[in-house]
Amino acid sequence: MDSIHLEKFESNVHSCIANYLLRRDAIDNRLPEAPDIEERWEKICMAYLPDGVREFQHYPTASLGWMMFIGMAVAQMWDEDWAMYSQFNDLYAILVKGRGYDNMDEYICTDFLKVDEQVASEISDLVGNVAEMVHNALIHEGFEPGTPDAFNAYVRCLHQLYYFGAAIWLKRLGYHMTAIE
C-alpha cells in the first residue's frame, strides 16, 4: 500500500471522528491548533507503541481509546503548567505509572483530569464509542493483520485519537478557536 492510500485512510478517520464528536458537541466546528501538544505526539507514540500493540489483539478498543485519554491528559498538562510538564521527556511514563496500563483511563480521569464519577463515565463512553468506530474503520479497510500497512494504519489512527482527545479536553477547559479577521 502506498502512502497516498494511508493518507486518504487517515483523512477519512479524521472526518468520521470529527463528525461524530461535532454531533455530540464534544468539539467546536473550528478545531484547535495546539503546536505544543502536537509536537509531543511522536515521543508519546513511540513510548506507547509497545503497550498499545501488545494489547491490540485482545483489547483493540482499549488500545485505541487509551490514546484519546492521553491526548486529554496532555491538554490538561498544557493548561495546568506547560512550563513544568514540557520539561519531562516521557509524558507517557507519567500517565502509565499512575495505575498501570490497564487502569490508565481511570487514573487520567480521576487523578489527572480530576472529574467526578459521572463525568468520567461520560468521557469513557464517548472514548469507547470513538475507539469502536476507529477499530471498525481499520477492519473495513481490510488491512492484513501483522503487516507494515496494518501497523502504519494503526499509528495513524492513534494520531487522530490523540489529536481529538486533546481537542475534546481543550473545549471542556473553555478554549475555542476563532477566525481572526
Image (cartoon, rainbow, N blue to C red):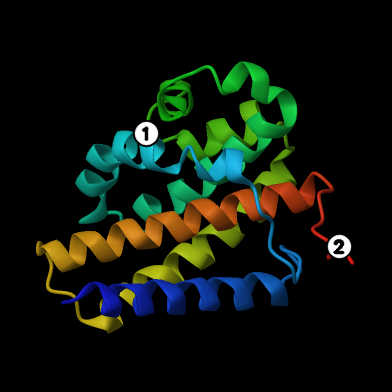
- Mark 1 and mark 2: Cα distance apart in space: 41 Å
Badge 1: how crowded within 10 Å, few (<14), some, or many (20+)? some
Horizontal arrangement in the rendering, residue 14 relative to residue 61 (left or right): right
Q: From the image, which quarter does the N terminus lie in? A: bottom left
Displayed quadrant of residue 23: bottom right
Q: Which residue is mark 1?
A: 101
Which residue is found at the position 54% from the left and 77% from the top?
Answer: 15
Q: Is residue 115 above or below residue 140?
A: above
Q: Nearer the viewer, residue 134 or 80?
A: 80
Horizontal arrangement in the rendering, residue 138 relative to residue 33 (left or right): left
Q: Position of residue 171 (x, y in %)?
A: 76, 53
Q: From the image, which quarter does the C terminus lie in? A: bottom right
Badge 2: how crowded within 10 Å, few (<14), some, or many (20+)? few
Residue 32: image tag: none
Q: Which residue is mark 2?
A: 180
Which residue is found at the position 37% from the left and 79% from the top?
Answer: 8
Q: Position of residue 45 (x, y in %)?
A: 35, 42
Q: Is residue 117 above or below residue 90?
A: below
Q: Secondary structure at mark 2?
A: loop
Q: Position of residue 133 (x, y in %)?
A: 45, 73
Q: Secondary structure at mark 1?
A: loop
Q: Does any portion of residue 153 appear in the rendered image?
A: yes
Residue type (three-letter) at the residue carrying disc 2: Ile
Q: Nearer the viewer, residue 44 or 64?
A: 44
Which residue is found at the position 58% from the left and 58% from the top?
Answer: 164
Q: Does any portion of residue 113 appear in the rendered image?
A: no
Residue type (three-letter) at the residue carrying disc 1: Tyr
Q: Is residue 23 above or below residue 72?
A: below
Is tag 1's residue or tag 2's residue first in the polypeptide sequence? Answer: 1
Displayed quadrant of residue 3: bottom left
All told, the count of numbered labels is 2
